Image (tube, helix red, strand yellow):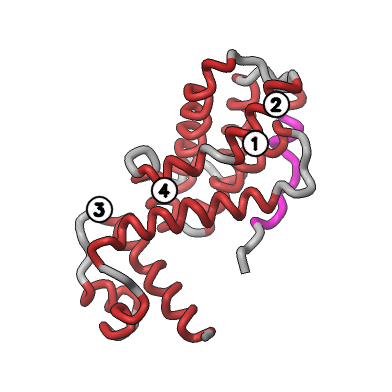
Amino acid sequence: MAAAHASKQRIYDAAVRLFAERGVEPVNVSELASAAGVARGTIYNNLGEPEALFGEIAGRLASEMHERVARSFEMVQDPAHRLANGLRFFARRAHDEPHWGRFIVRFAFSNVALQGMWNGHPARDLEVGLASGRYDFEPAQMPSVIAMIAGTGLSAMFLVLEGHKTWREAGSDAAVFVLRALGVAADQAHAVAQVELPPLPTLD
């Protein structure tokens, strides 16, 4: 069972690298097997339709990151602190896993599954922050606020991937800019953006 799981993970990781490098054009079984370092039969045994691989990968990455960030918030109540951590997690993971980061940056706005990363828990936290007075924006502006957060987060990841900023700098800057735009005082925004970032929980 462990070996099968490891093989599947290698296949997914290889697919992420291939899509991040060249876009959504279909990946054939031979090149995926070569990139993953497995036999062609292993690809067939672990995947459904190879033609549907991009959608499967996008959905998997979106739900996985969404759940890991949500788990990290179990002991954090302040919506501003949660939002700051979320943005910084994305910047740090782009540094730790560049192919993952490039996949997200390349397809986040064009793929429906990846767009969902910014809804769910992030949207609920915005609602909580607005209701509690932590944030200051009009309820009707929620879609624009979510788009701003997504754009700022992706820009931070891009800066990290291109070597213009460290993940700490890019992540903290993104958190401060977003929180200030949402009405959080400067000193408070800087404070939560500098708190030591915990490890991103795993899903094991």
**In which quadrant of the rendered image does the C terminus lie?**
bottom right
Q: What residue type is labelled 2?
A: Gly
Q: Where does residue 158 sit, x and y in percent of width and height?
A: 43, 42
Q: Counting residues from the N terminus, which is met first, the one under dot 2 or under dot 1?
A: 1
Residue receiving disc 2: 129
Q: Where does residue 18 sit, x and y in percent of width and height?
A: 30, 62
- Figure check: 56 above or below 104: below
Disc number for residue 104? 4
Q: Is residue 102 left or right of residue 84?
A: left
Q: Counting residues from the N terminus, which is met first, the one under dot 4 or under dot 1?
A: 1
Q: Which residue is drawn at 61% across and 64% down?
A: 203
Label 3, secondary structure: give it. Answer: loop
* Residue 95 appears in the rendering: no
Residue receiving disc 3: 24
Q: Which amino acid does label 4 sit on?
A: Ile
Please name whichever residue, 175 or 42, is drawn nearer the observer in this view of the structure.
42
Q: Give the range drawn in magenta.
A: 189-200
- Crowd around label 2: few <14 · some 14–19 · many ≥20 (10 Å): some
Please name whichever residue, 138 or 15, is drawn nearer the observer in this view of the structure.
138
Label 4, secondary structure: give it. Answer: helix
Please name whichever residue, 152 or 143, is drawn nearer the observer in this view of the structure.
143
Proximity of marks 4 and 1: CB atoms separated by less than 8 Å: no
Q: Is residue 168 left or right of residue 80?
A: left
Q: Counting residues from the N terminus, which is met first, the one under dot 3 or under dot 4?
A: 3
Residue receiving disc 1: 83
Q: Counting residues from the N terminus, which is met first, the one under dot 3 or under dot 1?
A: 3
Q: How far apart are marks 2 and 1 (CA)?
A: 10 Å
Q: Where does residue 44 sit, x and y in percent of width and height?
A: 29, 79
Within the image, what quadrant is residue 52 found in?
Answer: bottom left
